[in-house]
C-alpha cells in the first residue's frame, strides 16, 4: 500500500506563489503516476497536474500557465509550484498516488492541504 502526505498550503495574497509538497511512503518510481487535485467549496474535485513514473506531465488547461509539477525522486516527493495566485485558486489541494495492485488501479489520497488566496 501507498500513503501520501501533503504540506505547504496556507494563506497567500493574490499574485503570490505557493509550493505544495507531497511525500509518498515508498519509491515514487514504483507508482504509476502522482497527481495534484483541488476541491473548492461547492465544487467537484478537479485535476490540477499529474506526473507519470516516466516523468511525463499533464496539466489542467486552465492552469498550465501558472502551475508546475515536479519531483525529487530520492526524496519520494512531488511538488506543485503555483504562481500568480488568484482568489479562485482557493481550495483544498489533494495529492494522489495511482498505482496497481494485482493489475487493479488503486488510488491513495492524502488528507489535503488548504490553500486560501486573498484579494
Image: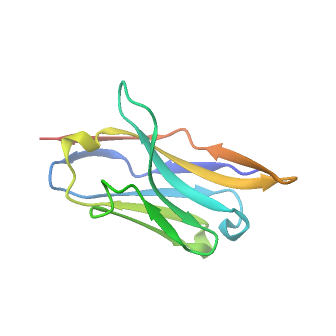
Residue appearing at x 22%, y 52% in the figure:
85
Question: Can you say whether 96 is above or below 114 in the image?
Answer: below
Q: Residue at x 73, y 67 (%)?
A: 30
Q: Position of residue 78 (x, y in %)?
A: 52, 63
Q: Residue furthest top?
A: 42
Vertical comparison of 61 with 57: above or below:
above
Quadrant of the image containing the C terminus: top left
In the image shown, does 111 or 90 lie closer to the viewer?
A: 90
- The total number of labels drawn is 0
Image coords of residue 89 (percent x, y)? 28, 44
Q: Which residue is at 67% across, 49% downward?
A: 3
Residue 18, given in percent of the width and then of the height, sits at 30, 56
State whether residue 48 is above or below residue 58: above
Q: Nearer the viewer, residue 22 or 91?
A: 91
Corner quadrant of residue 83: bottom left
Residue visible at 70% across and 67% down? Answer: 27
Left or right of 93? Residue 97 is right
Looking at the image, residue 86 lies above or below residue 75 = above
- Colour scheme of this structure image? rainbow
Using the image as rendered, state which of residue 77 and residue 53 is in the foreground.
Answer: 53
Q: Is residue 18 left or right of residue 14?
A: right
Q: Position of residue 93 (x, y in %)?
A: 43, 44
**Residue at the left extreme, as displayed:** 119
The residue at the far right in this view is 102
Amino acid at each position: 500500500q501507498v500513503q501520501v502526505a501533503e504540506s505547504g498550503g496556507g494563506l497567500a495574497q493574490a499574485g503570490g506563489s505557493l509550493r505544495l509538497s507531497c511525500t509518498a511512503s515508498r519509491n515514487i518510481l514504483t507508482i504509476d503516476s502522482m497527481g495534484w487535485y483541488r476541491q473548492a467549496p461547492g465544487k467537484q474535485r478537479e485535476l490540477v497536474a499529474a506526473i507519470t513514473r516516466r516523468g511525463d506531465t499533464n496539466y489542467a488547461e486552465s492552469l498550465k500557465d501558472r502551475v508546475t509539477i515536479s519531483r525529487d525522486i530520492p526524496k519520494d516527493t512531488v511538488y506543485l509550484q503555483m504562481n500568480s495566485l488568484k482568489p479562485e485558486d482557493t481550495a483544498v489541494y489533494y495529492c494522489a498516488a495511482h498505482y496497481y495492485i494485482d493489475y487493479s488501479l488503486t488510488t491513495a489520497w492524502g488528507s489535503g492541504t488548504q490553500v486560501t488566496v486573498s484579494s
